[in-house]
Every structure is written in C-alpha cells, then in structure tokens.
Image (tube, rainbow, N blue to C red):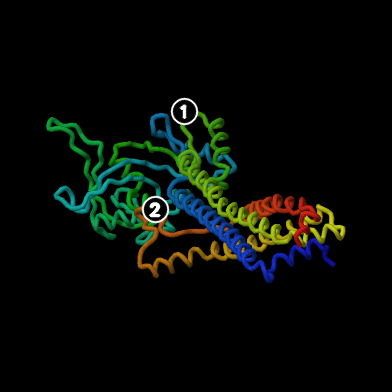
Amino acid sequence: MLPYEIRIGLRYTRAKRRNHFISFISVISMAGIALGIMALIVVLSVMNGFQDELRTRILGVASHLEITGSEGRLTNWPALAREVARHPEVRGFAPYINAQALLSASGLGGGETKGSLIRGLLPQEEDKVAEFDQKMQVGRLANLSPGAWGIILGADLARALGVVQGDRVTVIAPQGVVTPAGMIPRIRQFTVVGIFRMGMYEYDAGLALMHLADAQKLYRMGDTVSGLRVKLADMERAPWVTRALAHSLHGDYYLSDWTMSHQNFFQAVQIEKRMMFIILTLIVAVAAFNIVSTLVMVVTDKQADIAILRTLGASPKSIMAVFMVQGSLIGVIGTMLGIASGVLLAVNVETIVPWIERAVGMNLFPSDVYYISKLPSRLVWRDVATIAGVALTLAFLATLYPSWRAASVQPAEALRYE
C-alpha cells in the first residue's frame, strides 16, 4: 500500500478534464530534462573519447619521458640508458635525433618542396617506445639501415611530394658549409623505403624518419644524439618517475614527460569539458523552471482539493509531499529518458557520424583541419551518475516553492466561492 500523498501526486500527473494544458507543460518539462541529459552524456562521452584518442596518437609518436643534455645533445647515451633501465617502471628506451629539413621530390631543379621534422632513430630500439611499425602502410621500420640512406615518410607528406616507395627524395639540411661564395646547405638524396600513417595530420604531413647513423652523418653530430626517449609501465605515473630519475641520475640532464610537453593542450581540453558541462546543464535548469511553472498552475487549479484535504485532516507537510511527488516524478521520468537516449547515442556515435556524412555528402571532420579525422566516444558511467544526480537535484529543488505555496493555502479562503 502506497501512502496517500504518493497516490494523489501520481494521479495529479495524469491529464484530467480541465488540465490538459498543464499535462502538456509537464510533458514539455520531461522532454527538456531528457534533451539536456542526452546532450550532456553525448558531449562528455565524445570529449572523453577525443582526449583518449588524441593522447594515444600523440604518445604513439612522442614518448612518456624524454632525457636530453644541457645543450640539447647526449654524448654517451648507452651509459645513460643503462642507468635509466635500473628504474623498475622503465619498460624501454631509444635514442633519437631531432632536426629540420626541406624535402624535395625532384632535387633542386624544381618540383614540390616541403618542410619536415627529421627524426633519426634505431629501428630495433624505436619499436620499444613508439608505434611506427604498427602504423606502416608501405614497408617496415626495419627497412632503415645505416649507410643505405633510406627514409620513411608520413602518408600526407609523401602524397604532397608525389612520391611512393622506391622514389628518390632530396633532403636539404639547414646547417650548411661556409664557403667564399656564401653558405651552402648540405644536400643528400634518400630513397623512400616506407610510408606510415599515424592518424594525426601533424605527424602524417610533417615527419620523416631515417636511421640514426645517417642522421648523425647528415647533421654532423658524430656519436652524439639529441636525447633518449623512455617508455614507462604506466604513463599516468610519468611525473613521479621523472622526479625520481632527476634525483638518481648522475650528470647534467634535462627531463620532461608527456604531461609537460603537452600540458597546455590537455588542460585546455579539460577546461572545455567543464565549461560544456556547465553550459549544457543550463538546459536542464530551464526544464526545472518549467516544473516550477507547471506546479504553480496545478496548485492554483487544485486549491479546492487542497482545502478539502486540509479539512479532512491532512497536514501541511502532507500537502507539500503531494506536489513534491508530482514534480519529482516529472524529473525522474525525464532523467530516465535522457539517460537511455544519451547512452544509446554515446555508444553509437562512431556509427552515426559516418552515416550522417554519407547522407549530407561531406566530411564533417577533415584531417587537415582537426587533429583527428573521426569522432571517437568513450562512455564514463561516473559522468552519467553525476549528470543524473544534478538533474534529479534540480528537479527536486524546483518542487519546493510550489509545494510550500500549496501547503500555505487556507481552507476557508479557498472554499469561500465554491
């Protein structure tokens, strides 16, 4: 047996002869809450997926931790690597050379020329810290060998240069040789031995790989390297491992982890996620205001019923409970509908967006404009619980004033003209 307050509140929610308009407003309030919750769940899921996808792709090329020398060079990287490997959370390391160059498909005589970041690496070690081998479209990372002057290009860079595997590419290093005729840049021809696609336009259009020994010769670095890249067992612990290595390493080194090198970007994504939560919560707040107006109209319409209940012995608290049940029921139904539709959309975003692109005949996320070329989604149930809690709280708070107003109705005054 339900308490009579709940039974009367449920009965008032249904349409009767004279309050079809009030029930229509109740439906609009439910729809508003459902719409706001659905939008919140979908947007936060997309932003969670975007953040995870971006972090995965960035760390597929970058590293969890990088160690460089005081002047941007390391002279004895094998000894440093052995010292770093003693840390229990280190899973791999690889030396690298970072430099810039101009790439041309047809030498100095003309043709397309593109600026690119050059990374010199050891293929057998690079596979321990990056995912180039898994992202190769043509060739393999092992095709790079010392003295063979091979180069691996990003897919968009190769397309811009108009080259495929086996073609020749001229690499022009900005560090030149001073002669009486002026500065002459160092020029070397390389053979394209592979093409990779990481899924991020920044890397696919502006990164080229070559063997570490070839990079040392081209940039005249001798036996030195730019630094050491380190992979950890848990990337979330990178700041703690960085501090631990900074205290244990003997020498003048500069250490930076992925949270430092991309800190501003990930903080911006997090701030944007919070702001979207606040903005979209306003939709739920507007729907809660609709609950206030609905209940105020119900209280005005039901003054005679309230007076009769009071004369039969109902307390003001019971009258408040009747209308709080009615308003809360609107919030609960709207919340359940919003969660169901939001979860359904969030888990199917990656299927729905391509269908929309085919329907409208355009690419909504071009890779040369956005960091990624698709819309990822990751549903976090903690976010869903938070959204539901906020919606139910707003709906409950919206019932307080109309319920208090109903409890304040004086029976004699309400029945005077009945």
Marks 2 and 1 close (CB-CB < 8 Å):
no
What residue does disc 2 label?
Answer: 370
Q: Which residue is mark 1?
A: 252
Percent x, y for residue 276?
52, 49
x then y, percent, for residue 102: 25, 45
Q: Compared to 210, does 67 lie above or below?
A: above
Looking at the rendered image, the quarter that the C terminus falls into is: bottom right
Q: Is residue 95 above or below residue 399?
A: above
- Image position, residue 233 (x, y; %): 57, 47
In the image, 161 versus 269, the foreground residue is 269
Q: Determine crowd level at label 1: few under 14, some 14-19, many 20+ residues with C-alpha closer than 10 A.
A: few
- Quarter of the image holding residue 221? top left
Q: Is residue 381 visible?
A: no
Which residue is found at the position 49% from the left and 44% from the top? 266
**Labels 2 and 1: the sequence-earlier one:** 1
Left or right: 178 as drawn, with respect to 38: left
Looking at this view, is 375 or 170 the one in front?
Answer: 375
Q: Nearer the viewer, residue 127 or 393?
A: 393
Left of 302 or right of it: where is 106? left
Q: Amino acid at mark 1?
A: Asp
Q: Amino acid at mark 2?
A: Tyr
Residue at image position (59%, 56%) is 287
Exactly how many numbered labels are in the figure? 2
Q: From the viewer's perspective, is the residue at label 2 or at label 1 nearer?
A: 2
Residue in front for this viewpoint, 357 or 326: 326
Residue at the outermost right position? 313
CA–CA distance in space, label 2 to label 1: 39 Å
Please tell me which residue is depicted at 52% across the width and 38% down the height of the picture.
Answer: 84
Q: Secondary structure at mark 2?
A: loop
Percent position of residue 272, x then y: 50, 46
